[in-house]
Image (spheres, rainbow, N blue to C red):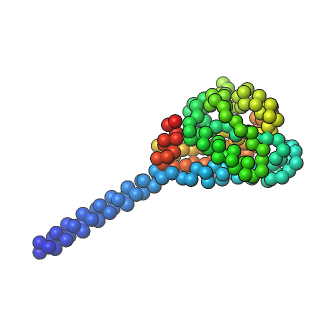
Amino acid sequence: MMKSILSFCFISLLTLLMSGCSYLLGQDQAFVDKDLVRTSYQAVDTLLKGVQNISALRGNPQHNGIYTNPPILVASFVNIDNVQRSSTFGRVIAEQMASRLSQKGYKVIEMKMRSDSIFIKEQTGELMLSRELRQISQKHKAYAVIVGTYGVSKYVVYLTAKLIRTKDNVILSAYDYSLPVGPDTKIMLRR
């Protein structure tokens, strides 16, 4: 009888612990980092697909309807709550996107800039290219620039990437996506 009671208590305790573990495992899945390289590459691929049918592009068509002759710039992604700040996360995303563009055969101008020169905010709250970025674009005869923002919540970071024509700030293509805030992402967002 004593063995039966001990066995029952042991099984009950084991069941309780296992259900607690499964609950925690479900919660921990939100804290697993995604492959940033893959998601950055996917973002570029999606941006390029988004401009396939735009006839306003100039040069010789070579990839997905985008002309590869004029260079494309890629700016660091900035925090949506403070567009004058970036982080390791925002700079890494930009570096990976520049790599993907290069792999696809586009001319990419290496651009190391201060994070406060990427965007300016107008009174209307609209984001536009800063004067410095516009000057760099003109100097290198860049046709477009990829810019982006990110917003951080408790478990997820939300990103928006835009391919913008430099001469008039027209958004040629945009892509929204999200990533879980895992341990690596959390560290990169702090720096």
Q: Is residue 47 left or right of residue 34?
A: right
- Picture mark count: 0
Q: Is residue 118 above or below residue 24?
A: above
Q: Is residue 93 left or right of residue 138?
A: left
> Could you tell me which residue is drawn at 33 percent across and 62 percent down?
19
Relative depth, front residue between 83 and 137: 137
> Could you tell me which residue is drawn at 79 percent across and 53 percent down?
64
Residue 76 in picture, x, y percent from top left: 64, 37
Residue 144, quarter of the rendered image: top right
Name of the residue lying farthest toward the top: 123
Residue 160 in picture, x, y percent from top left: 63, 43
Q: Is residue 55 above or below residue 147?
A: below
Q: Is residue 107 visible?
A: yes
Q: Is residue 114 above or below residue 94?
A: above
Relative depth, front residue between 33 and 12: 33
Figure quadrant of the N terminus: bottom left
Residue 80, quarter of the rendered image: top right
Relative depth, front residue between 91 and 43: 91
> Could you tell me which residue is drawn at 49 percent across and 46 percent down?
184
Q: Is residue 124 visible?
A: no
Residue 85, quarter of the rendered image: top right
> Could you tell me which residue is drawn at 60 percent across and 36 percent down?
78
Residue 46 in picture, x, y percent from top left: 70, 52
Residue 97 in picture, x, y percent from top left: 67, 46
Name of the residue lying farthest toward the left: 2
Q: Is residue 45 left or right of residue 186?
A: right
